[in-house]
Image (spheres, grey):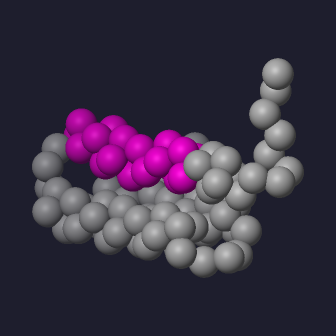
Amino acid sequence: MMPSFDNDPSEVRTLALAALLLLSLVLPLVLTFQSRGGTLGMKSNVRLVWIGQGLAGLAGVCILVTRIHPFFFVAVGAVICLIFSFKLRRAAGIHGG
């Protein structure tokens, strides 16, 4: 029998936290792929990853403690990952697709 996500907010929160957990892999992977060219400015780039991870962690805490729909905070986490991945790419001098 398929679970119903309509009436159980704990299941929706669990899915939202799982999605946010998967999004937390984005910034370390971007840093790993960018660092193949060298370690120039690596310390400041690690700071960017930690700041992005910390903000995404705050979005996870907000999922647990607020009554706002959890997927709003997943969207906030996705925007945080996009912003900081663009910052990491710009710091590495990577432009274009």
Residue 66 spot, x, y in % from top left = 60, 77
Instruction: From the viewer's perspective, tell me whether residue 18 is left or right of residue 68.
Output: left
In this view, the residue in front, 35 or 15, is: 15
Instruction: From the viewer's perspective, tell me whether residue 68 is left or right of residue 48.
Output: right
Q: Judge whether residue 19 is colored magenta.
A: yes
Residue 48 spot, x, y in % from top left = 30, 67
Q: Residue at x 47, y 48 (%)?
A: 21
Quadrant of image for the N terminus: top right
Position above or below: 69 against 66: above
Instruction: From the viewer's perspective, tell me whether residue 45 is left or right of residue 42.
Output: right
Position above or below: 68 against 73: below
* Figure quadrant of residue 93: bottom left
Residue 96 in sight in this render: no
In this view, the residue in front, 79 or 64, is: 64
* Figure quadrant of residue 57: bottom left
Highlighted range, magenta: 16-37
Quadrant of image for the C terminus: top right
Q: Residue at x 29, y 41 (%)?
A: 32
In this view, the residue in front, 55 or 90, is: 55
Q: Judge whether residue 55 is colored magenta.
A: no
Q: Residue at x 82, y 27 (%)?
A: 2
Position above or below: 32 against 44: above
Residue 11 spot, x, y in % from top left = 67, 48
